[in-house]
Image: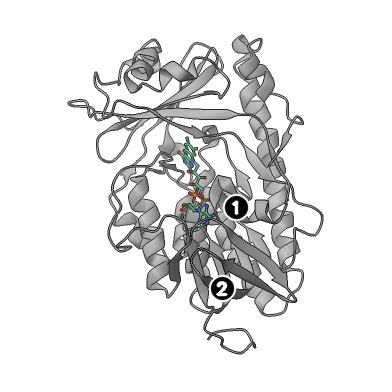
Amino acid sequence: MITGARPRLANHWDVIVFGAGPAGSALAHNLAAHHRVLLLERNLAVNPQSLPEGWRIGESLPGAAAVLLRQQGLLDRFLADGHTLRGASVSVWEGGNPVWFDGLRDPNGPGWHLDRVRFDAMLRNAARDEGVVFSAVGGGVRLLRAGAQWQVNDDRGGRQYTASVVVDATGRSAACCRALGLRRRAQDRLVCVHALLAPKVHDQDRCTRICADVDGWWYSVRVPSGQRVLAYHLDAKDPALRGLRNAQALLLQARHLPVLASVLPDRVASGTAQVRPAGSVFLDIADGGPRSGFYAVGDAVLAFDPLSSQGLFHALASAQSAAAAIADELEGDRRAGQRYFAQMRDVQARYREQLAVTYARPAHYGGRPFWAQRRREGDWMTVA
Ligand SMILES: Cc1cc2nc3c(=O)[nH]c(=O)nc-3n(C[C@H](O)[C@H](O)[C@H](O)COP(=O)(O)OP(=O)(O)OC[C@H]3O[C@@H](n4cnc5c(N)ncnc54)[C@H](O)[C@@H]3O)c2cc1C
């Protein structure tokens, strides 16, 4: 069944989703059985069925995600992809001693270390197989509300679409929210500098290793390829950032921390470390939600600090909730969007509370600006 009483114009869609990351692809997949869905993506591979090259940071998936993947009909596909089961977590956070948590004690199971590129491609392919239409889009897309529907003008591509619902799934850039002038708030200017390290002979370590440091914090995990991710989180204004863009320098600095040193190899896989924004950012949701017919999912509604390892779970969960709300709205329920955004506001509030508590724990570094700034729950700045 395809809903919507409007005439079937070639370029009219029930839903247009911007961004084919995990949130956008999962949302489109959830809706496609009953609705016409167009997914507009900035970086579409030439052959979308082929697996893109490379790797992407963001590789820890909590066990609770299995419930969502099952509900969305994606679990079998996911399990066939060869992601590795996570081992224990070991963190040196509140004091000098490592604290172990065995994921087997988690009722949801230990979770996975993902091949992240494969994970994102699986979600895109599942959406495509369900009938979602993909199209490449460049910059300069205009979004206009025309009566009860949206008009999307892709001036560079020479295309124009209309849709009943538009969804921002463009990740941290929140391109549609920004285009509509919606306000977002950020906690800080946290960045993650990360490198991929060459595999170490006989390394079978499956632990997630986390460590607080004087002016930031580290993590390292071994990904399914056998290579190891090393990541350091610090303030974007920290002068040390410049030197750490060299992956070998990053590796050298990590060697001072015993919980990491024991598993680090001698070589990096590539000479340059990458830097990505990693701070928490949330969409400031007014009472009643932004506008009817408009939704934001995944990082566009709440971008998590990587410390939480919740970004992908939230991408799947918000996609599932938004898909249900959109289906209701297309059936005539005018309050569906409000309910969805009220739920997202609760998620944001709980997250912010928990984040401040977590950053307050390394009390021995409490005097350092990096830690002091992040333990203040209320102090969030407006971002453009
Ligand atoms: C350093 C770091 C480590 C992380 N580690 C973890 C982790 O271990 N576990 C975890 O769960 N999460 C982790 N995350 C978070 C996780 O990666 C994100 O939460 C997740 O990618 C969000 O998915 P998304 O679909 O909302 O956004 P994205 O994955 O960012 O996807 C957005 C998509 O939109 C496209 N796009 C952008 N702008 C436009 C536009 N204008 N028009 C069309 N398309 C556009 C992009 O090309 C992209 O395909 C980490 C994040 C960082 C920064």
Tag 2, which secondary structure? strand
First reached walking from the N terminus: tag 2 or tag 1: 2
Q: Quadrant of residue 362?
A: top right
Q: Quadrant of residue 46?
A: bottom left
Front-most of residues 339 and 89: 339
Q: Which mark is residue 160?
A: 2
**Residue 302: where, in percent of width, then height?**
62, 46
**Residue 218: where, in percent of width, then height?**
46, 23
Front-most of residues 258 and 377: 377
Tag 1, which secondary structure? helix
Identified at 48% across, 77% down, the residue is 33
- Front: mark 2 or 1: 2
Is residue 104 toward the left or the right of residue 282 in the image? left
**Residue 356: where, in percent of width, then height?**
67, 28
Spot the residue most to the left. Answer: 201
Q: Which mark is residue 155?
A: none
Which amino acid lies under the numbered mark 1 shown in the image of this protein? Ala
